[in-house]
Amino acid sequence: MSLEEELKTTIALHRRQRARELDTGKRIFFPTSTDQVLTLRNVDVCLPSKIILQKVLIRSLSFTLNKQSTLLISGPSGCGKSSLLRLIAGLQYNTSTSPNSCIQFLRRDSTVFLPQQLHLIDGTLRQQLSYLFESKDLGILVEDNVKIRDVLLIVGLEHLLDRYSLDVFEHRWSRILSIGEQQRLMIASALLLLNTKTIGCLVLDEVTSGCDEETERRIYLFLCRMAIPYISISHRHSLIDYHTHQLTIDPSKQSYTFVSLRSIV
């Protein structure tokens, strides 16, 4: 089978899975007016695969988050954390065999997912900071220079304003910035988007791994002030202070623990 034929086969499989997931009620979208943000009921988290018999990483996962909740997902590498986020995002489909298995989440246009591997666009600094606005069909450039400076200060990138300016020059950011700086630039774009009040949930897949602890602290304090639900994957124990709940995955038993934390900073 050629690469093109294999790709077509994979796309066709994904379409069938997507249609079956919706038809059988394994994925339901919450209306924006609801107090709930995310509910998983008897969901098996599996390694993504084209074969029918997939390797189960977490079995019968069930929990609920509301608009006052924030979640920290932790566990060893390869335990299924990123697979769980792909499942929540709809990039992987709920193939659980349980008849009452279901994922309920906000619609994609009201959520922001920041993955480990970030893709920056070529353009001016303002265009890069406005990238998420365009992806949400807001169709506008961020024009508030004060807010831009404020979020760049939060993520420790205020020097980009003097070095590259906002509008004068276009750059290939993926080449001139370090991985950590690229992460922080995308976080800055997300923080600007949160100011529009159009986002119902933010999902961060280890995107602060390239930040020092002080920068990470400023980012999460900003998220706390915005009072928006967010879900984080991280290995850093210090992030417990900024979340109301923690999901810890135990791959040796295909199990998990879901606990409420004391309080949020």
Image (cartoon, rainbow, N blue to C red):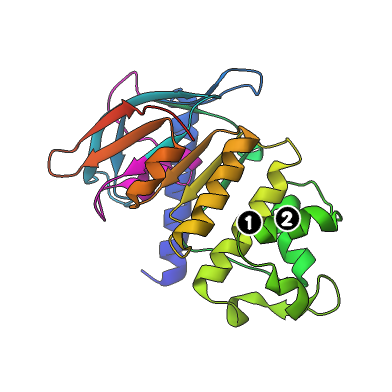
Give how far apart the Cα atoms at labels 2 and 1 are.
Answer: 6 Å
For the point 61% across and 32% down, the residue is 227
Q: Is residue 47 above or below residue 97?
A: below
Left or right: where does residue 34 sit relative to residue 94?
right
In which quadrant will I find the N terminus?
A: bottom left
Tell me the residue at 58%/62% (across/down).
184
Is residue 196 shown left or right of residue 244?
right
Give above or below for 166 relative to 106. Answer: below
Q: Position of residue 265 (x, y in %)?
A: 49, 35
Q: Amino acid at mark 1?
A: Ile
In-front residue for pair 245/252: 245
What numbered label is drawn on residue 154?
A: 1
The stretch in magenta equals: 73-101
The residue lying toward the viewer, choosing from 210 and 11, is 210
Rendered view: 35 above or below 12: above
Q: Is residue 176 visible?
A: yes
Q: Position of residue 183 (x, y in %)?
A: 54, 63
Q: Which residue corresponds to mark 2?
A: 150
